[in-house]
Image: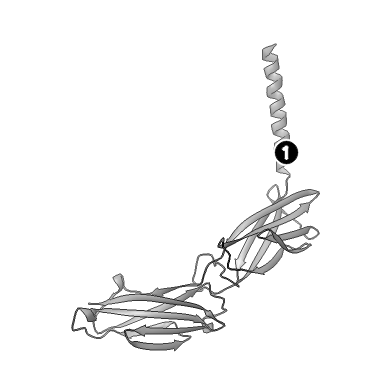
C-alpha cells in the first residue's frame, strides 16, 4: 500500500511539473535594450554610458518560446525610478534624459499585457560624470631627448555631438596653450640639463562648448631620457 501511495505521489508531482513547464514555456518575456546618445570616440568598443542630461533611448521586444512576437497592438507602459513617464499602444521605443541621482543610476521598468498575460522587465542604467583619457603613446611615458612628444586628449560621455564641440587647453609648466577643437598636442621636449628638467608635467583641460559646466582636467608626466 505504501509503495502504491509513493507511485501516486510521484506521478502527481511529475504531472504538476510538466504542467508548470508547459505554462512557463508559453509565458511572454520582455527584453529591454538601451543606448546613451552622447559623445565617445569612434574606435571605442565599450558601451557608452549616460551622464546627466544625456538623452537615453530605451527599447523593448517581446518573445514567446524564444520567438519574437508582434507588439504593435500591445499597450506598453514605461517607468523610471518608480514613476511612469510614457505609455502607448505599440510603444516599443521611447526616451528620457538622464539625471544626477543619489543612486548613480536609473531603474527602468517596462510593463505590458500580451495575450491576456502580464509581462514586465527591468534594467538599471548607470549615470556617470564625463571622463577623459590623456593618451601618451610611449613606453613608460619616456621620450628621447630632442624629440617631439605627441599627446592626445580623448573625451568620453560628454553631451556633445562631435569633436568640434570641445575646447582643448593645455599647460606645460607655466606655458599655457589653447588648441581649440584640436585634441592633439605636440611637445618639443628639448635637451634637459638637470634631473628636474627630465620630468615634464602636462595639464590638459577639456570643456564642452555647449555646456561650460562639463569640464575635465587631466594631469600626466612625461620623462625625457
Q: Residues within 10 Å of mark 1 (few under 14, many from 20)?
A: few
Q: Position of residue 68 (x, y in %)?
A: 71, 54
What residue appears at the point 41 percent right and 82 percent down from the top-left corner? 184
Vertical side of 75 occupied by 189: above or below: below
Q: Secondary structure at mark 1?
A: helix
Q: Left or right: 141 with respect to 216?
A: left
What residue appears at the point 32 percent right and 73 percent down from the top-left corner? 138
Vertical side of 163 occupied by 120: above or below: above
Q: Which residue is mark 1?
A: 22
Q: Quadrant of residue 165?
A: bottom right
Along the line of sight, which residue is nearer the eye, 73 or 97? 97
Along the line of sight, which residue is nearer the eye, 28 or 57? 57
What residue appears at the point 19 percent right and 78 percent down from the top-left corner? 195
List the single residue furthest toward the front.
102
List the single residue furthest toward the top.
1
Q: Position of residue 16 (x, y in %)?
A: 72, 31
Quadrant placement of the N terminus: top right
Amino acid at each position: 500500500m505504501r509503495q502504491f501511495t509513493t507511485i501516486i505521489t510521484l506521478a502527481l508531482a511529475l504531472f504538476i511539473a510538466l504542467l508548470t513547464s508547459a505554462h512557463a514555456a508559453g509565458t511572454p518575456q520582455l527584453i529591454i535594450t538601451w543606448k546613451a546618445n552622447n559623445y565617445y570616440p569612434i574606435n571605442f568598443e565599450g558601451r557608452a554610458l549616460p551622464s546627466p542630461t544625456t538623452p537615453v533611448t530605451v527599447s523593448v521586444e517581446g518573445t514567446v518560446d524564444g520567438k519574437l512576437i508582434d507588439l504593435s497592438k500591445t499597450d506598453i507602459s514605461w517607468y523610471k525610478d518608480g514613476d511612469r513617464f510614457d505609455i502607448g499602444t505599440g510603444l516599443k521605443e521611447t526616451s528620457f534624459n538622464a539625471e544626477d541621482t543619489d543612486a548613480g543610476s536609473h531603474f527602468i521598468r517596462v510593463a505590458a499585457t500580451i495575450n491576456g498575460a502580464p509581462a514586465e522587465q527591468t534594467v538599471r542604467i548607470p549615470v556617470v560624470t564625463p571622463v577623459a583619457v590623456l593618451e601618451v603613446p610611449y613606453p613608460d611615458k619616456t621620450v628621447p631627448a630632442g624629440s617631439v612628444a605627441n599627446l592626445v586628449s580623448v573625451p568620453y560621455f560628454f553631451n556633445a555631438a562631435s569633436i568640434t564641440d570641445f575646447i582643448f587647453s593645455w599647460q606645460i609648466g607655466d606655458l599655457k596653450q589653447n588648441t581649440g577643437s584640436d585634441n592633439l598636442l605636440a611637445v618639443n621636449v628639448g635637451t634637459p640639463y638637470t634631473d628636474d628638467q627630465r620630468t615634464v608635467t602636462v595639464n590638459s583641460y577639456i570643456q564642452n562648448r555647449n555646456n561650460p559646466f562639463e569640464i575635465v582636467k587631466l594631469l600626466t608626466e612625461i620623462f625625457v631620457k
